Image (cartoon, rainbow, N blue to C red):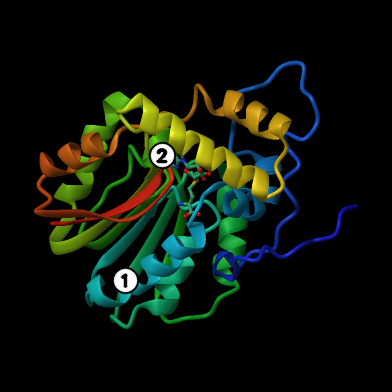
Amino acid sequence: MRAIIYPINIHCMHPSEPDLIFSNKKNQIKDFAFDAQVVEVFPDMITRSVPGYSTIIDTIGRISQQYVKDNTNIFDLGCSLGSATLAIKQNITAQHCKIIGIDNSPAMVERCKMHVNAFKGDTQVDIIEGNILDCEISNASMVVLNFTLQFIEREQRQDMIQKISDGMNPGGILILSEKISDPDPTCRNLLIDLHHNFKKANGYSELEIAQKRTALENVMRTDTLDTHISRLNSSGFSHITPWFQCFNFMSLVAIK
Ligand code: GEK
């Protein structure tokens, strides 16, 4: 049995097994799935793979202090183990709010409920197993899509963003974090190389990086920053700005 390790990122707040999922050569690489094996290593995987993850979680908490209003809902769509949910729960001062975290992975939801319940607080938190494409958004002062939209079929992204916009109160804020692809091939390759080096510096081997990339090929599809911005513009968001980018990972805010 391997020892439980604690990732350096304290914002993740969850213990994690080390991510060794792609460390051995596989004859056949299956499409990536957020299953029980991934849940065990998820905190380690996301902090070693996503540049700026802890900064983004931290900032979601800070933004929630300012934007979450009394008697409103907050949605964390594709909540995984609930890092953003917990950052919000621990930072908001608004009263009588409800945080709704939704994820369609049963293994994620089961573990997420354990983590969220371990933190006491006044704000009600509901962790729901479900598809974010089917959920109802209403009376929202804050919505978080932290690296989730990239797993939704491209043709369904506009409707998803429109549904979020329709369910948000005026002045409400959406945080959208995504891996992006640069439209310029030279820049795109530079950013991919820099991310590759980031993963190597975090202890992933060339084999692990290559096998994970193959596993994600049919599952995660990235858009350009311009595509994200025009989608938000046409869905009724009035103020949109990227606030974070490191290599091909970015986060933006969109205010209704
Ligand atoms: C974090 N936001 O730690 N409906 C519901 N959940 C979905 C769907 C869907 N249609 N598609 C994917 N998911 C988190 C990190 S991870 C990003 C988000 C990553 C869920 C999926 O099960 C997984 O838990 C999450 O979206 C994406 O702040 O691992 O790169």
10 Å neighbourhood of mark 2: few (<14), some, or many (≥20)?
A: some
Q: Residue 44, position in %: x, y?
A: 66, 53
The kind of secondary structure element at disc 2 is loop
Can you see residue 14? yes
10 Å neighbourhood of mark 1: few (<14), some, or many (≥20)?
A: many
In this view, the mark in front (2 or 1) = 1
Q: Residue 23, position in %: x, y?
A: 77, 35
Q: Residue at x 72, y 47 (%)?
A: 203
Q: Are marks 2 and 1 in contact (CB under 8 Å)?
A: no
Query: Looking at mark 2, is its residue's CB closer than 8 Å to ligand 1?
Result: yes
Looking at the picture, does residue 96 appear above or below residue 129? below
CA gap, disc 2 and disc 1: 24 Å
Q: Which residue is mark 1?
A: 64
Q: Residue 26, position in %: x, y?
A: 77, 22
Can you see residue 39? no
Looking at the picture, does residue 24 appear above or below residue 93? above
Q: Is residue 207 left or right of residue 56?
A: right
Quarter holding residue 33: top right
Quadrant of image for the C terminus: bottom left
Q: Which residue is mark 2?
A: 131
